[in-house]
Image (tube, rainbow, N blue to C red):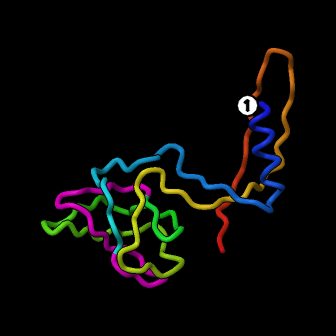
Amino acid sequence: MAAREAFVGAMRGMANTCLLWHMARSQPRGTMRGAPTAQAAAAGAGSLTVNTVAGATLLAGDMIGVSGLLLQVATDVTANGSGVIVVPLVNRLRRAVTAGTAVSWNKPSVEFRLVSSPSFQFFYGYGEGASLDFVEAVP
C-alpha cells in the first residue's frame, strides 16, 4: 500500500510522467523478436517498414514502439525473404522516424500522465485495490 501511495505522490498530479505499456499485450502475438530496426518514415505515415528476420510475423492488434511512439498493428503481416516487413498502423506516425531506429517489441513503452485523483482507504488487515487513469503525454 505504501509503495502505491509513493508512486501516486511522485506523479505530483499531472506534473510528472511514467513509462507504461499495454498491460494485456506486453509482447506481440506474432513471431517478430530480436533487434528489429525501422526504415525512414515521414510524420503522418500510415505504415512503418521494419528490418527483421525472414518470415517474422506481426498480428493485428500487436503493439510495437519506435521513436517514443506506441503503435498498434492494423493487419497480420509477414516479413519477406530479405526480412523486410511493411507494418500497416492503426494510428499514424506523429513524428518522423530515422532509418536504423530500434523497434521495441517487449513492453513497448511511452510516457503517460496520471489524470485521476486516486484515494486509498485503510482497513486493518485488508488492502484495497486502486484504479488509476492515465493519458499519453504527447509532446
Q: Residue at the spot x=23%, y=70% of the render?
A: 84
Q: Quadrant of residue 113?
A: bottom right
Q: What amino acid is at disc 1?
A: Gly
- Residue 65, percent across and down? 46, 62
Predominant SS along the magenta part: loop
Secondary structure found at label 1: loop
Q: Residue at the spot x=86%, y=29% of the render?
A: 121
- Quick check: 120 left or right of 100? right
Q: Quadrant of the N terminus?
A: top right
Q: Is residue 120 above or below residue 124?
A: below
Residue of label 1: 129
Q: Residues within 10 Å of mark 1 (few under 14, many from 20)?
A: few
The residue nearer to you, when weighing 48 against 6, is 6
Q: Quadrant of residue 129?
A: top right
- Residue 58, percent across and down? 31, 57
Q: Quadrant of the C terminus?
A: bottom right
Q: Residue at the spot x=77%, y=56% of the render?
A: 115
- Residue 87, percent across and down? 33, 68
The residue nearer to you, when weighing 133 against 102, is 102
- Residue 53, percent across and down? 21, 61
**Which residues, given as a range, are shown in magenta?**
39-63
